[in-house]
Amino acid sequence: MTENHVSYEIKEETTSVWAILSLISGIANYLGLWFIGAIAAIVTGYAAKNEIEKSNGRVGGLGLANAGLILGWVGIALSILSMCLVIFVAVGLICGSIAFCGPFSEWINQIP
């Protein structure tokens, strides 16, 4: 009789460094590195997804990369909304003070 020896290789799955950096950048976006942290989270998140896809199962961390991407895109959206709010407030202050200095203020003062 012949003996068949079957050997199994244990493949260690490592976590992508890009995925970890993406999550850290996404969190840092909300802790003081506004907009820059969001851009870093998006760039490193896509780099991590690319690395994980090409590794054939040797590199993990897809959940970390996705979390970093979500935090990054939400951070970009919040940054854009806050910039629009700042612009609207500044325009409102400037236009409001101009409107009350001219004939409009005289019309307002005539209302009983």
Image (cartoon, helix red, strand yellow):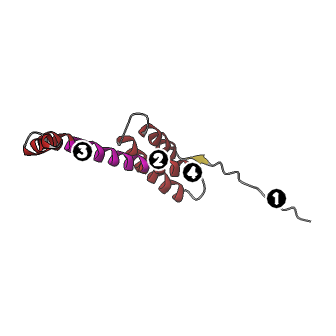
The amino acid sitting under disc 2 is: Leu
The amino acid sitting under disc 3 is: Ile
Mark 4 residue element: helix
Q: Which residue sits furthest top?
A: 32
Foreground mark, 2 or 4?
Answer: 2
**Magenta-tinted stretch:** 74-92
Q: Which residue is mark 1?
A: 5
User: What residue lies at 70% left-to-right and 51% top-to-bottom?
Assistant: 10
**Labels 2 and 3: the sequence-earlier one:** 2
Q: Nearer the viewer, residue 107 or 67?
A: 107
Percent across and percent down for residue 18 are 48, 46
Q: Which residue is mark 4?
A: 63
Label 3 – label 1 distance at C-alpha:
72 Å
Percent across and percent down for residue 55 are 55, 56
**Labels 1 and 2: the sequence-earlier one:** 1
The amino acid sitting under disc 1 is: His
Q: Which residue is mark 2?
A: 71
